[in-house]
Image (cartoon, helix red, strand yellow):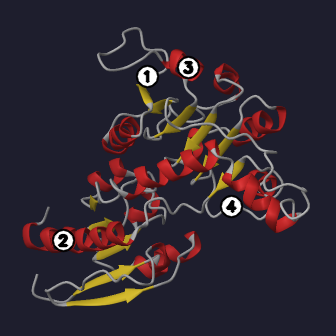
Amino acid sequence: MSNPLNIVFLDRTGIPASHEIPRPSFAHTWTEYDRTSADETYERAKEADIVITSKVLFGRELMSKLPRLKLIAVTATGTNNIDLVAAKELGIAVKNVTGYSSVTVPEHVLGMIFALKHSLVGYHRDQVISDRWATCGQFCYTDHPITDVRGSTLGIFGKGNLGSEVGRLAELIGMKVLYAEHKGATNVREGYTPFETVLKEADIVTLHCPLTDSTQNLINAETLSLMKPTAYLINTGRGPLVDETALLNALENGTIAGAALDVLVKEPPEKDNPLIQAAKRLPNLLITPHIAWASDSAVTTLVNKVAQNIEEFVATGK
């Protein structure tokens, strides 16, 4: 490939401004956009040899109109925004990045566990909204529940890299860890616990399974009803793993004790998203804006791996 390759980065703001993807060593042109809508994608990608993106959608119809495109370099692990079957048939390589968040996501989950079990959101909100401490007439007050993390049971759905690391850290701080078998499985594998048993026994449920047809709305009104009224839900996986309407109902009705979410079904959410609105008034709902993956070390690893993926593809064609 002697001519300069045209590289187009479609959603630069998907990576923190403090980090840049290292530029390739081969001859190239580089164009980047903060974000790209569906209506803008074709025009911006039509002359690209390589596209870099995190979340821009690439379906069959679009890719069939991009004969010059040879590589989609994904700045994330998930590739559900790309029709992988169509990409393969059209000769477009797709290279993602795995393993870069194996420290930061489990740490984020542990932070959420402590925040939920110690009602940190509720106590912080009290001071911001109502001056509760200043007016309680005592050196402290205990309006929100505080329970120990040590000795509680953590139910993990997904035993991959992230789920396993969450389990390892949880055991180090004295938690009992249960890994959930697939829903509806007839056989329970060694090291796993039946799906419904985990829901019934866990004090905290955390989701680390991939988003598939069988896991969409894995947490719904039925599964939430199996959980303890004192249990908490954490989702740092994919938003559609959870039926958001069912979760909100469960929080408002006391079906479960609370939830912490780093992902939502639609991202960014609409301003009137019911869960976002509920988080303004519910002391037991913590929402972070999909940043569990974004520690400094994780982002550094990510951008270096994206650059490596591009270099390797140009050098080897795969």
Q: Is residue 21 left or right of residue 243?
A: left
Position above or below: 257 against 111? above
Instruction: Identify the residue under disc 3.
Output: 201
Q: Is residue 163 left or right of residue 149?
A: left
Ranked by sequence position, the earlier of labels 2 and 4 is 4
| Residue type highlighted by circle 1 | His
Identify the image quadrant of the N terminus: bottom left
**CB-based contact (under 8 Å), mark 1 and mark 4:** no
Identify the image quadrant of the C terminus: bottom left
Mark 1–mark 4 distance (CA, rounded to whole Å): 29 Å
- Residue 131 in picture, x, y percent from top left: 87, 65
Mark 3–mark 1 distance (CA, rounded to whole Å): 16 Å
Mark 3, secondary structure of its residue: helix
Mark 2–mark 3 distance (CA, rounded to whole Å): 44 Å
Mark 1: few/some/many CA within 10 Å (<14, 14-19, 20+)? many
Instruction: Identify the residue under disc 4.
Output: 269
Ranked by sequence position, the earlier of labels 3 and 4 is 3
Mark 3: few/some/many CA within 10 Å (<14, 14-19, 20+)? some
Position above or below: 233 against 184? below
- Residue 246 in picture, x, y percent from top left: 74, 35
Instruction: Identify the residue under disc 2.
Output: 308
Ranked by sequence position, the earlier of labels 1 and 2 is 1
Query: Residue 4 versus residue 128: which sits nearer the camera?
Result: 128
Mark 2–mark 4 distance (CA, rounded to whole Å): 32 Å
Depth-wise, is mark 2 or mark 3 nearer the camera? 3
| Residue type highlighted by circle 4 | Pro
Q: Is residue 309 left or right of residue 117?
A: left
Position above or below: 283 against 147? below
- Residue 161 in picture, x, y percent from top left: 31, 43
**Can you tell which mark lies on residue 182?**
1
Ranked by sequence position, the earlier of labels 2 and 3 is 3
